[in-house]
Image (cartoon, rainbow, N blue to C red):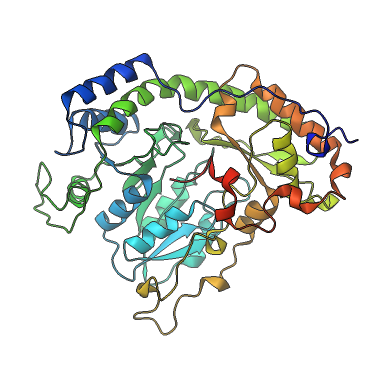
Amino acid sequence: MSELAILGGNPVRCRPFSPWPQYLPSDVQRVQRVLESRHWGGYPVPSRFAGEFADRFAAMHGAKYGLCVSNGTIALVAALRAVGVGFGDEVIVPAYTWDGTATAVLFAGGIPVFADVDPDTYCLDIESVRRALTPRTKAVIPVHLAMRFVDMDALLALATDHNLKVVEDCAHAHGGMYQGRGAGSMGDVGCFSFQESKLMTAGEGGIVITSDLRRFEHMQSQVNCGRASLTDVYHQRVLGANYRITELQAALLAGQLDMLPEMAQRRSRAAARLSEALAGIEGVRPLPPQPEITRDTLYCYVFQYRGGETGVARDVFAAALEAEGIPCDGRFYEAVYRSDLFYASPETSPQLRIGRPEPVDYSRVRCPVAERAAYEEAIWLPQFVLLGDDDVEDIALAVDKVMRNLADLETAEPSLAGVKSMSRAERPKHERMRNY
């Protein structure tokens, strides 16, 4: 019998990792106060806890204004509309990200154009963005992915040269800083998610931050049913809907913000130890350091599997690692244009054909680095495995064990991976860490 747990051996780890989400006693007290107040919703904007939290969160990231919204995808939609993206405008997005980054562009009336990612960060590759530019390009969405940042200096220079708006997708980057600048404060608008797996969570929710009052007022009106903003300096009247966050959610977020610095330090220390350990294991590669990051943010720990030449697919490796008691995912993200959830077509999104000689055809898109990450290389570990004092030692032991026994997996049934013949909708275990 093989040593590998997936083939009948004993797993490296049987005890659970740190629970997530985590909360403080003060959260219970705050939620109790909201319950007793009988004001649970999000009107007026901002309600007390939502306003207090938004101000603190924006200031932590170096922005003047913050506005809580219903979720991270709506944050992107509101931001795109506020920077002027309209029907048929093109918006460049990374091919390797959550589907919501691209579908938000469609919801705003725009057309997502996919650019490839950098092989060392899995974030948007600037030269690929440059090649994707057309006269229709209005904006670009850099996604700071997992544990790395987009090269924002190069991107902002490119945006200035071509008069592009920059909407930062910071769903993974709460509290992070790049060259001393907070995530979300470098572009025109920054967007964050508070979905349950994120570094801060209220179960669901999101926030937009900006230092531009005109855009801030525009977004206030959008998410508050079209009502005028509180300041109303620019007298903007826009079609809006109810995308408000509730006071119950905002009450939870206050405690999440209190806990963030200490938890971020724990994750950072654990990630450094894990990278050092993985660097000594043949066949895997930790992502190279990014010196420009001046305050770490680690939504997930990502490393690269390089054992594919043995004939053992990445998805089989991921399944074997999970069987050793280490929560992980290979197909955490797919190349969006190949994703089961990206239903973009001229029938569902008429902006893909109106005013164009030929409709946009996403079946023709190829982004090699994104596809390699999605289907051959990337391994994602959820952030809560970095919260325990000695948990990374078990992770390194499990990775080493699987790599030493890869030969046992070469003839194993591919269905062990659990993803080969299944669509995303049929893979519930892969949904527990994902999504906005």
The residue sitting at 44% across, 33% down in the picture is 176
Residue at screen point 53% across, 24% down: 19
Percent across and percent down for residue 274 are 67, 27
Q: Which residue shows up at 42% across the image and 71% down it?
A: 134
Q: Nearer the viewer, residue 22 or 172?
A: 22
Relative vertical location of residue 299 with respect to residue 239 in this rendering, above or below: above
Q: Position of residue 253 (x, y in %)?
A: 33, 28
Residue 395: x and y in percent read 70, 28
Q: Is residue 314 left or right of residue 138?
A: right
User: Which image quarter holds the N terminus?
Assistant: top right
Along the line of sight, which residue is nearer the eye, 291 or 218? 218
As drawn, the residue found furthest toward the bottom would be: 357
- Residue at far right of view: 1
Look at the image and tell me whether residue 30 can be seen: yes
In the rendered image, the quadrant that contains the C terminus is top left
Q: Say left or right for 77 vs 93.
A: left
Q: Is residue 281 visible?
A: no
Please name the residue shown 31% across and 47% down the image.
189
Image position, residue 422 (x, y; %): 64, 57
In the image: residue 398, left or right of residue 371:
right
Using the rendered view, name the quadrant where residue 69 is placed.
Answer: top left
| Extreme residue in the top direction | 25
